[in-house]
Amino acid sequence: MRSTYGGHNRLFEMIPGALVWFTFLGAIALSFARPLWAIYAVILFDLYWLFRVVYFIIFVVFSWNEYRRSLRIDWLSRLSREKADWEKIYHLVFLPMVDEPLSIVRGTCEALCATNYPNDKFIVVLAGEERAKEHFEVIAADIVSNYGSRFHELIITLHPSDIPGEIISKGANMSYAGTEAKKYIDAKGIPYEHVIVSAFDIDTIAHPDYFACLTHTYLSQKDPTRSSYQPVVLYNNNIWDSPAPMRLAALSTTFWLLTELARPDRLFTFSSHSMSFRALADVGFWQRDMVNEDSRIFLQCYLHYDSDYSVVPLYIPLSMDTVLAPTLFKSMVNLYKQQRRWAWGVEHFPYLLEYFLHDTTIPLGRKIYRLWLQIEGMYTWATAPVIILILGYLPLLLADTYVRTTIIAQNAPYILAWLMNLSMIGIFTLGILSFFLLPRLPARHDPYRYLYMVAQWVLLPVTIILFSALPAIDAQTRLMTGRYLGSFNVTEKMRKE
């Protein structure tokens, strides 16, 4: 059953933001009216969050072990040995861009050429925007000249501006590029089931074994066209040059994804990922009016196939850029906008709710579970850091003399400090694991930079408020009040050579 919902149900859009603001205002009101109740509530919430930290670490360690194991496998040899028909598979790689520099685009193409996989099995689509036509034509000419003969096919597309029904977005660009690639695939008579699509950001550097691992995993599925394939996303391309808040945000995103990979039933596609061309064509390519097309494409397939669609984890990495601009202030602004764009994925909740109310084929239990995953994730993203680090101490400040003489009020600061210290074990674990995710230190940096990588974790409480909770609150409040983002904010790409 194909989804036909494309409008705005204002009531449904208000739900996530209303829950967030009800929580904040309710916590403040309770701290004034019943501070003792608020103290109990804060302790219970912090205890609940401690349990979440514990299982977070368990899943991170599990995925970490799978990741290390996957890196030790010679995937091309294994593919050749175990899958006799693997050479029938083509890889269609989309590289959408706007105004990124030539060095970024070349780096991505070089990484594709350097993979442990036959280059003549790659169909690469460099997808530019008409609004940056002059810049793109220079880039495209260089890429065609240097890489045109190194792939099975290099397709250049230019997405027209101002198409009715579209917003300025990566999804609109890739959807147009997808229809152009479909013409080529149809002309060549390549079966859709034999084409694996990889939707990459333009700064994506593929691990040498990525496509061999992807092909092996694809051919190992009972029905490979009914799955998307989500790799480990690293932000290593320029991590040694980026400021501490940007590094913390990047590493936190990677660790969050590692926990999700350990629980495939929860997985959505995120950032650069892969899927079958069969599924992509069946759903009509990416929606052209979406900011977060990377996660929406999974939901398009999930709904189109009546929930018979899943995401398969790939414990092999793709590397992209951290946020980096010429100045620290500009980097911080760009990071906030990037996080707000990611948090705008809250728009999936009203989309799902509207669809589920009219659908009669997907089991009720699956509907409830999907809605719960969507709303719970967005809710805790916006509220948990604020409650733990700010509002949790408000009732202690507002309590009167009588409340302060109670045993629970007198011991609350120590209980909260004890719970926070236990949670610090999680931060300490992530700090250690993060060292093993880092690329080699560039020669231009002295070894003392490793100390910065240790010291940066003391900034996590500030970073998680400014560049995680606040962007999420911003996004959900915008959706609640009907102030839509309206376009895809392209994060500036910059690397120091």
Image (cartoon, rainbow, N blue to C red):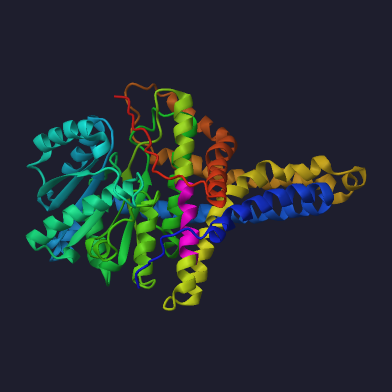
Q: Viewed as shown, does residue 88 lie left or right of 25?
A: left
The reply to whether the magenta stretch includes residue 468 is: no
Can I make out residue 242 in this image? yes
Vertical relation: 343 (above or below) 455: below
> Residue drawn at (19%, 40%), measured in percent from left and top?
109
Q: Viewed as shown, does residue 309 lie left or right of 34?
A: left
> Residue drawn at (12%, 53%), measured in percent from left and top?
121
Percent from the top left, x then y, of residue 422?
64, 47
Which region is colored magenta? 342-353
Quarter occupied by residue 99 = top left
> Residue drawn at (51%, 65%), measured in percent from left and top?
371
Q: Quadrant of the C terminus?
A: top left
Q: Quadrant of the N terminus?
A: bottom left
In front: 20, or 422? 20
Q: Viewed as shown, does residue 278 lie left or right of 240?
A: left
Residue lying at the far right of the rendered structure: 402
In front: 68, or 417? 417
